[in-house]
Amino acid sequence: MKFKRIAAMLLAAAMVMSLVACGSSSSSSSSSDSSSSDAAEEETEDAEAEEEEEESDSLLGSDSATIRLTIGTTTSADGHYVLGLVAMQEKLEELSDGEMTLDIYPNSALGGESDMMDAVSLGTQDMVLSSTGPIPSFSSATSNWATLDLPYLFETKEDAYAVFDGEIGQELLDEFEGTGIKALGIWENGYRELTNNTKEIATPDDLAGMKIRTMENDVHMATYTALGATPTAMAWGEIFSALQQGTVDGQENPLAIILTAKVYEVQQYVSMIDLFYSPCVLMINEDTYNNFTDDQKAWFDEAAEYGKEQERAISQEIEDSAREQMEAEGVIFTDVDKEVWIEAVQSVYEDESLGIDQDLLARIQEVTAD
């Protein structure tokens, strides 16, 4: 690449000299500017490629490990998913004395969440850390996970932790048995906020007719329909081109993702609606896990629990500073009257087509009422 850039610069210089000799100063300036721009663009692309390669290498586990587990996420390398996985990686290497490790692949490098879940169930990928978006449609055994996607189900994170770290959470994880996947723990994505690049959105009326990207999730889509928007299900990897091309007007995600994935660079407005508390789930191929020795299972389980606790803390830390950081970049935040939004989505709870597990819902509400 270095020689190509030098050649481009020499060619540009030769063109300039030739045009100057002909007395065409304006053409000379234009050619020089164009060549310099091309060279600068190529240099930027080279630097970005090198940075991505270094970033990818830094997320691979210890070279000496004999058991290497490949895990993918759709989030950025500096996001809370990946930083939590790095904590798990380090703990696993420590507990196993370097025998076991994780090779972490961020930024949808191994595919979208649905694709990665399928790959893990088939054994062509070891692990995935995925949002709950694709889980209800993954298997009939996990269809009741749709209940967790209801709007305003968890008033606080502590309410969510009480459910996910207790009896209900373990029962939900156990539902994966026999699907090819072992679900290990429920980590954190966060409260999902709404972004757009058109206007401040304070009430559901402000959403009328707007096209909003959602996860590939029936409950989320039904919720945005109830709010008057036009939901468009879309894999995370497609979102930036869709926003830039106007295929959708906005999207929704936790602040930690809006910040670390730099969504704010193409979306000027953030509405703090806290519409869904969104968990994510750590999964491993069932046969891979079952083939571990008892010691290896113990190391792995402890490292996974440690990673979950660290990831939740990192999520909160990023969230605490995200608004201030984005406001400094010119992003406009809108605080809303959540009672208005809660009232607007009550019909979703009564929509029989969504397959909400009413018994599970009642149990969750009983735990969070305490």
Image (cartoon, rainbow, N blue to C red):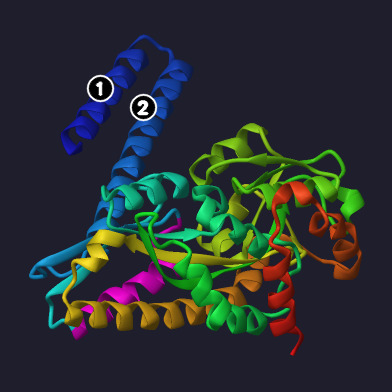
The amino acid at mark 1 is Leu
Q: CA distance from mark 2 to mark 1?
A: 9 Å
Q: Position of residue 174 (x, y in %)?
A: 45, 69
Q: Position of residue 259 (x, y in %)?
A: 56, 62
Which of the two residues, 139 or 244, is positioned nearer the viewer here?
Answer: 139
Q: Position of residue 202 (x, y in %)?
A: 87, 59
Q: Quadrant of residue 225?
A: top right
Q: Residue under circle 2? A: 35
On residue 100, the disc is: none
Which of the two residues, 248 or 52, is positioned nearer the viewer here?
Answer: 248
- Does label 2 or label 1 sit earlier along the sequence? 1
Q: Is residue 275 magenta?
A: no
Left or right: residue 17 versus residue 27 is left
Q: Which residues are magenta?
A: 75-95
Is disc 2 surrounded by few (<14), some (14 to 19) or many (20+) residues within 10 Å?
Answer: some
Element at label 2: helix
Is disc 1 surrounded by few (<14), some (14 to 19) or many (20+) residues within 10 Å?
Answer: few
The amino acid at mark 2 is Ser
Q: Quadrant of residue 290?
A: bottom left
x 74%, y 73%: residue: 362
The C terminus - image quarter: bottom right
On residue 11, the disc is: 1
x 69%, y 76%: residue: 364
Magenta stretch mostly in which secondary structure? helix
Work out whether residue 16 can be spotted.
yes
Circles 2 and 1: CB atoms closer than 8 Å: yes
Which of the two residues, 245 or 232, is positioned nearer the viewer here?
Answer: 232
Left or right: residue 67 versus residue 344 is left
Farthest-out residue, bottom = 370
Element at label 1: helix
